[in-house]
């Protein structure tokens, strides 16, 4: 079975997603705010707020932040999560369909902009920004434990048996996200009139128990889409494999950031 449009899946696990999906490193926000200063007069849009993993550093600037997310459950979670910030609001719907009035100083998207058709998304962002306004997109790219090749090989076999077979895909080797991929993603903005395009990579590790890792996998769209009975067997095998190899798994994250500016006229 092949499932193509999976953005519906996240709303079904909103609470778990909010708890387990990681935020982003401080250096990323420092880079953004050095590129574009934000303060209490600034108008900002977050595209795809999810569980609010990337929201607080922007709210702390005092900016007026309007978040958009396809999942109403995420909007409810974030309205409660950021209720102490009168400068925050959240609206449910697809970014490409929602009409957001006004001109914005900054529009950003964290691990979400890939769900929007490229031409529609970039053209809409460009139209919504003030002259000199900034678009930034960033995302986390996890890579499986480098220190346990035997565990990784065992997990490859499990994925082949359950994940790839279910989605009717050929198994493919894991690959770390590269600087070339970050550069190529950054240059997309030039096709739509943006200038001063920049990118940067950040790195970190996260370590999970077997149980925690299974909960994390349960927030991935292509894993959620697997039929429940098969998914339970799949996760059971992954958890057992981790426990056979010390009970922990370390994930190596590469976080890419792309920055682009609307031309000043």
Image (tube, rainbow, N blue to C red):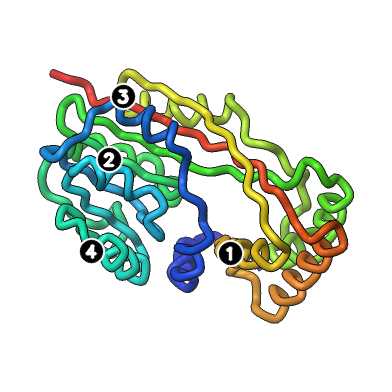
Can you identify the residue that label 3 sits on?
A: 35
Label 2 – label 3 distance at C-alpha: 13 Å
Name which quarter of the figure residue 131 lies in: top left
Element at label 1: loop
Residue 3 is labelled as 1
170 or 198, nearer to the observer:
198
Q: Nearer the viewer, mark 1 or mark 4?
A: 4
Can you identify the residue that label 2 sits on?
A: 107
Q: Is residue 76 above or below residue 148?
A: below
Left or right: 62, with 122 as reference point: left
Q: Earlier in the sequence, mark 3 or mark 1?
A: 1
Label 1 – label 4 distance at C-alpha: 36 Å
Q: Residue at x 36, y 54 (%)?
A: 48
Q: Nearer the viewer, mark 2 or mark 3?
A: 3
Q: Residue at x 16, y 53 (%)?
A: 87
Within 10 angstroms of label 2, few (less than 14), some, or many (20 or more) residues? many
Q: Earlier in the sequence, mark 1 or mark 2?
A: 1
Name which quarter of the figure residue 198 lies in: top left
Within 10 angstroms of label 4, few (less than 14), some, or many (20 or more) residues? few
Element at label 2: strand
Residue 83 is labelled as 4
Residue 5 in picture, x, y percent from top left? 50, 61
């Amino acid at each position: 079975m092949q499932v193509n449009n999976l953005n519906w899946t996240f709303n079904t696990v909103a609470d778990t997603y909010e708890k387990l999906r990681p935020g982003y490193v401080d250096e990323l926000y420092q880079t953004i705010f050095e590129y574009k200063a934000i303060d209490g007069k600034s108008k900002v849009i977050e595209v795809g707020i999810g569980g609010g993993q990337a929201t607080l550093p922007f709210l702390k600037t005092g900016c007026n932040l309007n978040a958009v997310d396809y999942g109403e459950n995420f909007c409810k979670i974030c309205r409660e999560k950021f209720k102490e910030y009168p400068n925050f609001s959240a609206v449910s719907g697809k970014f490409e369909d929602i009409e957001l009035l006004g001109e914005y100083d900054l529009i950003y998207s964290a691990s979400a902009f890939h769900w929007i058709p490229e031409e529609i998304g970039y053209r809409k962002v460009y139209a919504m920004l003030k002259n000199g306004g900034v678009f930034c997109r960033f995302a986390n790219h996890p890579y499986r434990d480098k220190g346990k090749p035997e565990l990784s090989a065992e997990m490859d076999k499990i994925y082949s048996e359950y994940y790839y077979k279910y989605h009717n895909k050929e198994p493919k080797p894991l690959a770390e996200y590269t600087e070339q991929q970050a550069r190529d993603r950054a240059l997309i903005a030039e096709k739509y009139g943006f200038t001063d395009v920049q990118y940067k990579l950040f790195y970190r590790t996260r370590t999970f128990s077997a149980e925690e890792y299974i909960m994390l996998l349960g927030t991935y769209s292509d894993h959620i889409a697997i039929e429940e009975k098969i998914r339970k067997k799949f996760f059971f095998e992954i958890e057992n494999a981790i426990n056979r190899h010390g009970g922990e798994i370390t994930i190596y994250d590469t976080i890419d950031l792309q920055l682009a500016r609307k031309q000043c006229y």
